[in-house]
C-alpha cells in the first residue's frame, strides 16, 4: 500500500481490518484482501501469495503436557480455533503422508487471528496461526512451535473485488501494484 500511495498521491484509501468475512458491495468495500486455505481463480480474484501456518503454544503449556511425537499425541491438549475455519480439520503433512489431529472441541474460539495468537502466547491453548505472527516470539522463546517437523497447508492470500468492477479501473491498478510488490 505504501508503494501504491507514493506512486499515486491523489488516490485516497481507507483500510478496514477484520477476520470476519464481509460482503464487498453490501458492506461498502471496493476490494478485499482475503486469506484462506483454498483459492478458486476467477476474473474477480488475484492470488497474491501463500504464507506458512504453524501450530503454536506457550512454553509453559508445552512443559505441562506429555511429550508430543505425532499428531495423535495432541488429542487431549486444550485447543483454540479461529472462528472462520473452526470446522476445518487440522492435517499435518510430512513428505506425501498426511495425518489428522483428532482433538476435543476447542475451549476458545476467536474471530481474529492476532487475538487468537495472543491467547496462545498467554498459555490458553494450542492454536494454528499464520507463521508470520509467531516468528519473532519463537526466536525470543516466548512461543513454541509444536510438531515443527510436520507441515500444515499454507494460507493463501488473495485480492477479491466485485465482479462488475471496471476492467481497467482503480481496483485493477491497485491489484496490479500489489502483484508487483509481492516479488
Image (cartoon, rainbow, N blue to C red):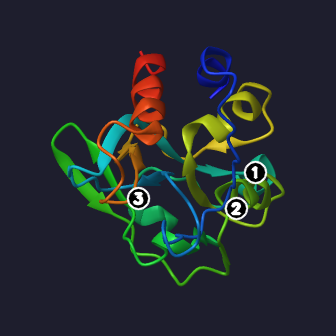
Relative depth, front residue between 110 and 157: 157
Spatial CA span between label 1 and label 2: 12 Å
Residue 31 x, y percent position in the rendering? 49, 52
Residue that numbered label 3 is attached to: 71
Name the residue that disc number 2 marks: 116
Q: In which quadrant is the N terminus drawn?
A: top right
Asked if disc 3 and disc 1 are in contact, CB closer than 8 Å, the reply is no
Please indicate whether residue 160 sits to the left or right of residue 118 in the image. Answer: left
Q: Name the residue under label 1.
A: 58
* Residue in the image at 18% along x and 48% along y: 97
How dense is the environment of label 2, judged by Cα within 10 Å: few (below 14), some, or many (20 and up)? many
Which residue shows up at 62% across the image and 49% down it?
56
Relative to 176, is 43 above or below?
A: below
Question: What residue occupies the far right of the structure in this picture?
Answer: 122
Image coordinates for residue 90, horizontal then vertical, percent? 39, 63
Give the mark nearest the N terminus, 3 or 1: 1
**Drawn side of residue 106 relative to residue 89, left or right:** right
Amino acid at each position: 500500500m505504501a508503494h501504491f500511495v507514493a506512486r499515486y498521491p491523489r488516490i485516497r484509501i481507507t483500510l478496514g481490518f477484520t477476520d470476519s468475512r464481509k460482503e464487498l458491495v453490501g458492506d461498502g468495500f471496493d476490494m478485499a484482501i482475503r486469506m484462506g486455505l483454498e483459492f478458486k481463480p476467477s476474473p474477480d480474484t488475484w492470488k497474491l501469495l501463500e504464507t506458512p501456518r504453524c501450530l503454536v503454544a506457550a512454553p509453559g503449556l508445552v512443559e505441562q503436557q506429555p511429550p508430543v511425537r505425532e499428531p495423535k499425541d495432541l488429542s487431549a491438549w486444550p485447543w483454540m480455533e479461529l472462528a472462520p475455519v473452526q470446522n476445518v480439520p487440522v492435517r499435518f503433512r510430512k513428505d506425501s503422508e498426511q495425518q489428522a489431529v483428532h482433538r476435543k472441541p476447542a475451549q476458545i474460539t476467536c474471530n481474529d487471528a492476532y487475538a487468537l495468537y495472543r491467547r496462545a502466547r498467554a498459555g490458553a491453548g494450542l492454536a494454528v496461526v499464520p507463521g508470520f505472527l509467531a516468528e519473532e516470539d519463537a526466536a525470543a522463546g516466548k512461543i513454541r512451535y509444536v510438531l515443527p517437523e510436520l507441515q500444515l497447508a499454507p494460507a493463501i492470500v488473495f485480492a477479491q473485488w466485485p465482479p462488475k468492477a471496471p476492467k481497467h479501473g482503480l481496483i485493477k491498478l491497485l491489484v496490479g501494484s500489489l502483484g508487483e510488490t509481492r516479488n
